């Protein structure tokens, strides 16, 4: 069957994929390698490419090609592929090229300055750059909202989690807010009675790096198709064919880096196992940020903090950091499931983590809707941290509202995905346990293949074949159900 | 004075500069970082960008803009800038986009395969990829020759050393061939009587890296605007704003890496000190490959192998590799000026080096002119190595014709630049000594500023302001004069 318009669209997307490859690698390099004086030129180069990619995604001929492809005799997969091409087209055409370029430049500048401003606790300096980032994000939200008919914040969130709305987030986070503070208290009460041995450091960076690499290998990361490096803010970048993980090391504590590496490995395996036959097309990309986070949290929390998994990790830790009583599997697992109310989201345990997300969601939504200004953030941050976790962050910008780079990079509507991901992950493991009642014993025995096979079949290999609700339904037999997350936390932390 | 056409051309070149930035960084990454399974996608991405840059450099409107700018009231610098824009336009328009893309793809594939084929001594495998590279290089030469009216090999060489012709290379290399074999013999006779202590290894890679970084700092490399990494074949890449050097380490011998790093530092400082006010325009780029090599050889040979410079290097070597009698300045200098007939060009001393270049020049010229085929290379290589250096390389492809990646990357007409560069470098230092008779004492005292200041004023800051002969005349008061190179070798190696 001849499908000339659809074929033409495929070629155009593959060209965009090839050029975006260079942008991804140069962006990773900007965070992992680039010396400071290179930043101005890099920012200009990335902005130029951002503009070019936007131009390619908005070429006038695309509208006609999409309409003609719609009339062609496409099979089911091609039709899903066309649906995703239309999604890209719609979101690309909502923004003028000048805004895309201005955003790229402002975000790069703000992110780069943040790297030195955060350690200096320089909120005033950061604020100066952030105002422009927010101004452009609001402009973006306004245009996306106009185009889609959604509310402004919904329009931004829709880019990361298609179909998710603030009303739905309110419902789910509202449920969480009800039982989370009580659960945190119960868990902390229970853990008071536990004895946890603290590891004795320091832990040299080189040894931690080797430990991280072993953990990645245990979890199936393909080092022939990716790397582990360092950056101020850990992330999973690069391209599906060459995935670039980063982490950061603290010589006084190896756990943040180890769990961070395991987290990013979940993102990495999703990317490394995206369907190769659709590579370069929108249907071949990861479905959504929430589903992406469901993979990183499947690795970090469902597996990484599993008592059986600690038995696998324990010998690796001893191999690289030396023998210590604290490295025994039981103690390691207690260390990795310790619940503490802390300042830093990325270091938070899985029980307090949703509190960090709720706080950010409430602030960024108000910021985008124009109800507050950047100047109002610190006071709101202080108030909500006190409310949700009982912590005082006044004046402590670097461990407060400057800890994440998201807002400096123009990422608004992204934060809810972290907690949606935690819920999806709990739902995946509940589904696996129904099919494999001995799953926990298998994990403890080092047989991780059933987990990876399930994720590969149900999530990784699906790319963007289905919209999220349908993927969730197909994978687990039901739509998103937060009860699984609650049950998981109760089982793991209260033995209930 | 309004110069709309010239201004439009400037904007177009700056856009090309920004996009080429991403290509440079991704190419560096391909050599320094990329895991093997990333290569296919990277090659496709670089080919796509190569095609795009070619398209931007050949847009039909440029012809008209160049003609209109010619009529505008330009000052001397703008006129030189326009001359360089025309040079870029001419060379870009000689080749169709399909050839540019095919070259990029074939070169990437051949270079990547070479990385594993060379250690495996797999000439047959390399040959398979190289045939396509040569086929495309010949096609390129044919088109460039048609366009310029030059001979085929001249047309290729003109890309790297504008204005240089095979007839001139024949004249200079003919002169060299006359006295070089005799000089090598004389020097080896003289050195037979010298006692040289050999360093006792091994030398850990991390210590060598730190030593290299200290040597780079001594030579003024700006680590805020560049990095040192590792790759199979050392090179100086990246962009002027962020220069990426690479080297490779052998734990049994630290000298190849140290001298290689010093060599690349010369290239790097040229790039780091190109005139910032012309950045993004052709006039702001380094003048030619021969002049580039004159910088790396000013650093590696004129300075690096200088007996006074050894006094500066000696304490750095001891600091990183421990105290050894062999690290005394005098002995270090004897080690660094040891003349030996060896297989490997990049490890060759400055006396035998020109023999390696003459050999390559003769082979590649015949290859491009169609007088020989790829299959003929090993036999010719063997014959000429025997003739020029008395060495038998039969069957030893990895240390013979597979040692360099140039021919696999489609770089033909480039090799002569190495020896032209050595001659320019000797001419620079002869000029400096005329103005500063105490130059050698200053170098020994660690006062390198006069050397760097001279190079900065006369070469680095000039970008492509002048064509090479005029730059040489302005810098040294005469045109290229090989007598300086001969006098330098005689003075350093025979004390004459």
Image (tube, coloured by chain):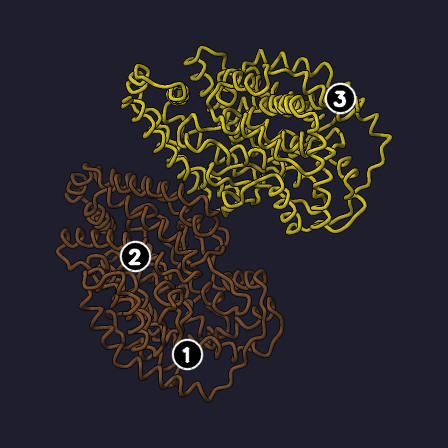
Chain colours: A brown, B yellow
* Front in this rendered view, residue B309 or B399: B309
Residue B476 position in % (x across, y down): 59, 19
Query: Which callout, 1 or 3, points to the residue nearer the camera?
Result: 3
Residue topped by disc 1: A339
Distance from Cα at disc 1 to Cα at disc 2: 28 Å
Name the image quarter holding residue B305.
top right
Against B177, residue B130 (above or below) is: below
Provide the chain ID for the residue under circle 1. Answer: A
Q: Are marks 1 and 3 in contact (CB under 8 Å)?
A: no
Of mark 1 and mark 2, the one earlier in the sequence is 1
SS of the residue under disc 2: loop
Q: Are marks 1 and 3 on the same chain?
A: no
Lateral position of residue B404 relative to residue B22, left or right: right
Residue topped by disc 2: A411
Distance from Cα at disc 3 to Cα at disc 2: 65 Å
Mark 2, Cα crowd under 10 Å, few <14 / some 14-19 / many 20+, is some
Residue B150 position in % (x across, y down): 48, 12
Q: Are marks 3 and 2 on the same chain?
A: no
Say which mark, if any, is on residue B490: 3
Lateral position of residue B54 relative to residue A148, left or right: right
Provide the chain ID for the residue under circle 2. Answer: A
Residue at image position (87%, 30%) is B193
């Amino acid at each position: 069957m001849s499908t000339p318009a659809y074929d033409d669209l495929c070629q155009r997307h593959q060209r965009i994929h090839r050029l975006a490859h260079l942008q991804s690698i140069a962006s990773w390099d900007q965070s992992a390698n680039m010396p400071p004086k290179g930043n101005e030129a890099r920012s200009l180069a990335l902005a130029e490419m951002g503009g070019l990619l936007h131009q390619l995604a908005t070429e006038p001929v695309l509208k006609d090609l999409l309409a003609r492809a719609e009339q062609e005799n496409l099979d089911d997969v091609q039709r899903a592929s066309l649906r995703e091409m239309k999604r890209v087209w719609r979101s690309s055409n909502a923004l003028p090229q000048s805004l895309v370029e201005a955003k790229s430049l402002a975000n790069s500048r703000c992110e780069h300055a943040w790297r030195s401003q955060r350690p200096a606790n320089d909120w005033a300096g950061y604020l100066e750059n952030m105002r422009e980032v927010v101004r452009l994000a609001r402009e973006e939200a306004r245009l996306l909202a106009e185009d889609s008919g959604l509310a402004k914040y919904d329009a931004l969130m829709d880019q990361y989690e298609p179909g998710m709305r603030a009303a739905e987030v309110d419902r789910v986070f509202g449920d969480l807010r009800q039982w989370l503070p009580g659960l945190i208290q119960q868990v902390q009460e229970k853990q008071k009675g536990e004895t946890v041995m603290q590891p004795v450091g320091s832990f040299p960076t080189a040894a931690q790096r080797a430990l991280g690499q072993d953990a990645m290998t245990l979890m199936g990361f393909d080092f022939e198709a990716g790397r582990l490096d360092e950056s101020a803010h850990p992330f999973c970048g690069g391209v599906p064919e060459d995935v670039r993980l980063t982490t950061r090391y603290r010589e006084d504590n190896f756990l943040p880096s180890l769990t961070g590496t395991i987290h990013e490995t979940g993102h990495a395996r999703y990317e490394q196992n995206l369907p190769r036959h659709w590579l370069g097309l929108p249907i071949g990309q990861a479905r959504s940020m929430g589903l992406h986070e469901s993979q990183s949290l499947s690795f970090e929390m469902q597996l990484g903090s599993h008592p059986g998994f600690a038995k696998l990790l324990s010998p690796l830790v001893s191999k690289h950091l030396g023998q210590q009583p604290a490295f025994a599997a039981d103690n390691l697992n207690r260390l990795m499931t310790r619940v503490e109310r802390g300042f830093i989201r990325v270091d938070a345990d899985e029980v307090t983590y949703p509190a960090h997300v709720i706080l950010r969601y409430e602030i960024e939504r108000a910021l985008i809707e124009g109800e507050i200004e950047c100047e109002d953030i610190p006071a709101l941050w202080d108030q909500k941290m006190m409310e949700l976790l009982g912590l005082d962050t006044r004046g402590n910008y670097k461990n407060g509202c400057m800890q994440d780079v998201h807002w400096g990079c123009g990422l608004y509507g992204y934060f809810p995905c972290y907690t949606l991901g935690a819920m999806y992950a709990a739902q995946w493991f509940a589904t696996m346990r129904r099919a494999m009642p001995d799953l926990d014993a298998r994990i403890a025995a080092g047989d991780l293949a059933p987990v990876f096979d399930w994720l590969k079949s149900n999530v990784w290999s699906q790319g963007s074949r289905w919209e999220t609700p349908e993927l969730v339904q197909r994978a687990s037999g039901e739509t998103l159900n937060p009860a699984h997350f609650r049950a998981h936390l109760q089982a793991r932390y209260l033995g209930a």
